[in-house]
Image (tube, rainbow, N blue to C red):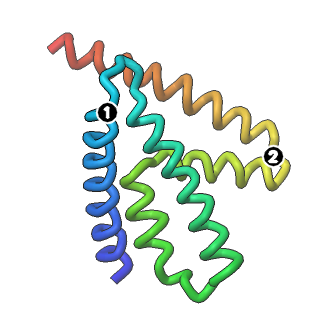
Amino acid sequence: MMYLMIALGGAFGALSRYEMGRWINSFWSLPFPFATLVINVLGCALMGIAFVVINERLPSLEAYRPLIMVGFLGAFTTFSTFSLEIVSLINMQAWLSAISYLLLSCILGVAALAIGIALARLF
């Protein structure tokens, strides 16, 4: 049942991301990836809300965590999970881990993408 919840949440999250991106881009024709920025920031806010509601306010909703946090928000934007992990490290006062994770994820992620593009263009 958990896998079904994740799959359904993921499908709705991916569709929501796609449609929201199309909608935002219909208003903005800038070279800046504004739609992605808005979606990532919104996803982070929703992840924060879901985290508090499920963990602190209504723990009876724990069974819906896979649907909401892993499935929907995970597909809507993985940036929200990334941000939650950094905040969790900060809350544990694991400052070096938080900063390292932030910097390494951004730098290595961009570098890996560039390498992937370069490798794909070789063939």
Q: Secondary structure at mark 1?
A: helix
Q: Which image quarter holds the N terminus? A: bottom left
Instruction: Tell me residue 115's x, y (percent).
Output: 36, 17
Q: Is residue 22 above or below residue 67?
A: above
Residue at the left extreme, as displayed: 123
Q: Check disc 1 and give the amino acid type.
A: Phe
Q: Earlier in the sequence, mark 2 or mark 1?
A: 1
Q: Check disc 2 and give the amino acid type.
A: Ala
Residue at the right extreme, as displayed: 93
Q: Which residue is mark 1?
A: 27
- Residue 24: image quadrant is top left
Q: Secondary structure at mark 2?
A: loop
Residue at the (28%, 42%) spot, across then down? 23
Residue at the (62%, 66%) spot, across then down? 51
Q: Is residue 24 left or right of residue 49?
A: left
User: Answer yes or no: do the residues labelled 2 and 1 have beta carbons within 8 Å?
Assistant: no
Q: Is residue 75 left or right of residue 68?
A: left
Q: Is residue 4 left or right of residue 94?
A: left
Residue at the (64%, 34%) spot, across then down? 102
Residue at the front extreme, as displayed: 27
Residue at the (41%, 72%) spot, across then down? 67
Q: Nearer the viewer, residue 48 or 100?
A: 48
- Residue 52: image quadrant is bottom right
Instruction: Tell me residue 27's x, y (percent).
Output: 31, 33
Q: Nearer the viewer, residue 108 or 9?
A: 9
Instruction: Tell me residue 29's x, y (percent).
Output: 30, 23
Q: Which residue is mark 2?
A: 94
Q: Which image quarter holds the C terminus? A: top left
Instruction: Tell me residue 76's x, y (percent).
Output: 39, 52
- Residue 57, label in figure: none
For the residues marked 2 and 1, what is the alpha-carbon distance in whole angstroms? Answer: 41 Å
